[in-house]
Image (cartoon, rainbow, N blue to C red):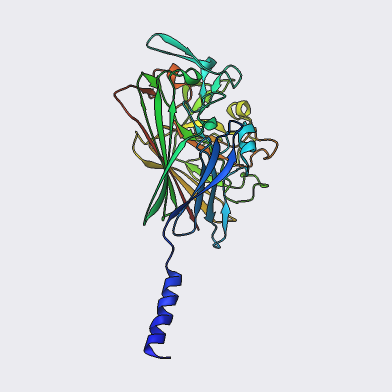
Amino acid sequence: MGVFSTFLNDLIMNSKSINPPPEVQKKIFGTLSSGVDVFIYSLINSNGSHVSVLTYGAIIQSIEVSDSKGNFGNIVLNYDNIESYIKDTSFIGATIGRYANRINDAKFTLDGHVYELDANDGSNSLHGGLEGFHTVVWTAKTSVNKSSATLSLSYHSSDMENGFPGNLCTTITYTLTNSNSLEIYYTATTDKKTIVNLTNHSYFNLSGNFRKTVLDHHLQIESDYILEVNSNLIPTTKFDKVSSTPFDFRQPKLIGQHITSDNNQLRLASGYDQCWVLKNNGDLKLVSKSFHEASGRVLEVLTTEPGIQFYTGNHLSGFYNKHSGFCLETQHFPNSPNEPEFPTVILNPEDTYRSTTIFKFSNQ
């Protein structure tokens, strides 16, 4: 083989070993009855990992990452059509707002004025109400550089929409990096004093097989306390120590190890659906780690939020079965607008709401 032929062969072989640059792909996912098109944006990094997000509900529709053998698979519960998302009552993959989790009696008081919200969870307001951020169409912008692919979604929520005061302008930025981190940045501004608490409601199943439960996953949560809840799953303001209880995940253990234990808090929620109190003091820190032994997939969660709601899909039914996925919802505490001793969720017109959560994927 001549020198030029050798050089050409080496060039071809080397080019095959170079990973492609990150990219963003856009397709129509469906059309609403109003005639508005819903798009799906796929963020693809140089490793071949995919994160797909809908403009409807700013929903994470899929997260495809490799297992320990190099096989790619989706690890979040999802639907393949817009009609199923519209009918869904489990907030699968959705962005939650204006207020994540529960507000007692579907009302709160701000500066002496009582604001009444949708009561869509018994007497409580849950996840922003019936027509919260999970049901609206967001405006999209994309960008790409050599290390990441980014999708920014924006929505203007009008004053008194679903009962919340203030014109709220919210932007959610999803960035998939070449290190297999999905970085989620939330920002919001208002023209009137209001409350804000945003999160993502993806259900993870690291096996990639949604016919199986997540009870065989190992989980670790860096927390010494959970918020005790009453029969309506509203915090009593009591911080319960996790030590010597089924809620102690300070060391990794199977999700299913104690989920059926004789414990009143577990009975009230039909499994895990509690808020763990975090130690990050507003700094971005590692707060949770999940591991699925058979696939080798690992999920790490970093956040700036003071709490994380761990939910084991106790009420999933129909398309998915109970415990088909688990949620790690980084957020402020439930019912904070009615509990002045909890970290504040008030946003003033002169301030900007900021929150960061990172889902980092790997395998071992």
* Residue farthest to the front, as pictured: 35
Position of the N terminus, as image quadrant, is bottom left
Q: Position of residue 310 (x, y in %)?
A: 53, 36
Near-viewer residue (113 or 275):
113
Q: Quadrant of residue 340?
A: top left
Q: Quadrant of residue 317?
A: top right
Near-viewer residue (232 or 259):
232
Residue 57 appears in the picture as rendered? yes
- Height in image: 136 above or below 114? below
How many marks the image carries: the answer is 0
Q: Is 305 placed left or right of 329 in the picture?
A: left
Residue at image location 53% in from the left, 32% down from the top:
134
* Residue farthest to the top, as pictured: 112
* Residue farthest to the bottom, as pictured: 1
Q: Is 278 placed left or right of 294 in the picture?
A: left
Q: Position of residue 297 (x, y in %)?
A: 53, 54
Near-viewer residue (263 or 129):
129
Residue 332 appears in the picture as rendered? no
* Residue farthest to the left, as pictured: 350
Q: Position of residue 6 (x, y in %)?
A: 40, 85
- Height in image: 86 above or below 6? above
Q: Is 124 placed left or right of 19 in the picture?
A: right
- Height in image: 326 above or below 2? above
Q: Position of residue 8 (x, y in %)?
A: 41, 81
